[in-house]
Amino acid sequence: MEQVYRRSLGNLLNELISVEEELSDLYLRLGGIIDEPCAKLTFMVIGEDSTRHAEYLKLVKDSLVNAGYVEGLETYSAGYMVSRVREIKARILSSRGVSLKSMANALNDLEEAERMALNMYLLISKNYRLHSPSSSANSCIINGALLVINGIINDEEKHESLLKNLISHQ
């Protein structure tokens, strides 16, 4: 059971790293081409946060792998979340001209992607608490990883609020 958990957590971290990389690329590209100031601010903030999240998750995963808490996975195939984000990204970037008005459906899709990521982070946070050793040499690493994940959760909640604000003002 412990090995299955470690492999599952490794897969989930890989999935979230890929999701954050895809979202970062999408949001930063949108922020670079859209003219509306509120949309530009929203996309650039979320894009920069997503870039940081991917980097933090790589550090978390490497630390947990080195501590023996998560299995290092040599191969990884993208799951549903990455596929869904790529689909949203392709649809948005293939449309002619990007404006806030033309992005009504896309904004709802982006909000869905942010919600999926938030739910995965909440799942990891809950599992860290359930599987965290009470006292060991690795508890510092595990507690640090939990603090990073909780910081990302706060950012994901901010992203959801920013997107809702944009949706309500279009």
Image: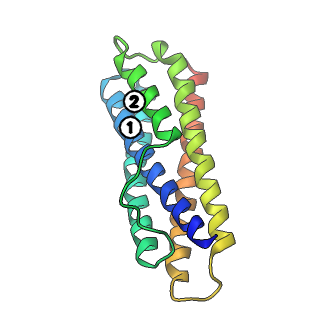
**What residue appears at the point 37 percent right and 14 percent down from the top-left corner?**
95
**Label 1 Cα neighbours within 10 Å, binned few <14 / some 14-19 / many ≥20:** some
Q: Position of residue 98 (x, y in %)?
A: 37, 17
Residue 40 shows which numbered tag?
A: 2
Secondary structure beneath label 2: helix
In space, the residues marked 1 and 2 are separated at their CA atoms by 6 Å
Residue 44 shows which numbered tag?
A: 1
Instruction: Look at the numbered discs 1 and 2 and tell me whether their residues touch, using CB distance below 8 Å.
Output: yes
The image shows residue 136, relative to residue 52, as above or below, that is below
**Label 2 Cα neighbours within 10 Å, binned few <14 / some 14-19 / many ≥20:** many
* Kind of residue sitting beneath label 1: Met
The image shows residue 129, relative to residue 104, as above or below, that is below
**What residue appears at the point 60 percent right and 40 percent down from the top-left corner?**
115
**What residue appears at the point 46 percent right and 12 percent down from the top-left corner?**
102
Q: Image check: 127 left or right of 14?
A: right
Q: Position of residue 135 (x, y in %)?
A: 61, 88
Q: Image check: 104 left or right of 36?
A: right
The image shows residue 30, relative to residue 137, as above or below, that is above
> 18 or 4: which is nearer to us?
4
Secondary structure beneath label 1: helix
The image shows residue 36, relative to residue 53, as above or below, that is above
User: Can you say which quadrant of the picture contains the C terminus?
Assistant: top right
